Amino acid sequence: MVKRSHARFALTAKAEQREHGVNACISTPLKAKALKAILTQQIQQTASLVPSQAAFLQQEPVSIETKQAPAILLAEDNPINALIATTMLEHLPYRIDQACNGREAFNKATHYPYHLILMDINMPDMDGFSTTQAIRDWENANGLAPTPIIALTANALKDDREKCLAAGLNDYLAKPVKKDEMLKTIQQWLEQSPLNQKAKLQLFTEIA
């Protein structure tokens, strides 16, 4: 009887969590293995299937409205690295969206006007270089200004920056990324983001 009562309580607790928008829970003290498992599970559940790149290249341009919530896209397949990065960025006045592979990143980047994209280079399915090239092709096809894309790479070779620039990325950060370095680089490119430039132009026009 005790076991059955406990089971009913557990089911009720899960139902209440879902009712309040909680997808999962984990007990403390936190263990790295358990945290990684639950993050991986949640990312896999929210990942969506993406049609071919050619289909996206034929779509109409997205409507860039300044009233839409300003957001940054983080493309990172490692859930621990994604958690670390989002923690570093949590105080920025931008929503942080996540993609766990290149196809999902391409899907999101072509459906929402992001102010900036953080692109992991070594991702499954489509790596960061291929994903960036696909995004650039889509922007060119739709007459859109290029979104700043910053590479996140575990490599720290001398020619990495040149390789990233040649692939259409604007800059790169070597892993493990330091918080001060990441925020400085992001701030620099957010100031140059086409969406922020457009918002400034509209503001000046309204003042005039």
Image: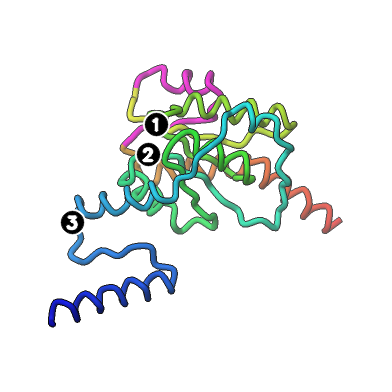
Q: Position of residue 77 (x, y in %)?
A: 37, 39
Mark 2 vs 3: CB contact within 8 A: no
Mark 2 vs 1: CB contact within 8 A: yes
Q: Name which residue lies at 50% across and 34% down.
A: 103
Q: Which mark is residue 77?
A: 2
Dividing the picture into quarters, in which one does residue 2 lie? bottom left
The residue indicated by pointer 1 is: 123
Left/right placement of residue 95 relative to residue 113 reads left
Up/down of 163 relative to 146, above or below: above
Whether residue 160 is in magenta: the answer is: yes
C-alpha distance separating marks 3 and 1:
25 Å
- Report the label total: 3
Magenta stretch: give its range. Answer: 157-175
Left/right placement of residue 184 relative to residue 196 reads left
Q: For the residue labelled by badge 3, is the local secondary structure a helix, a strand or a loop?
A: loop
The residue indicated by pointer 3 is: 31
Q: Name which residue lies at 38% across and 54% down.
A: 87
Q: Amino acid at mark 3?
A: Lys
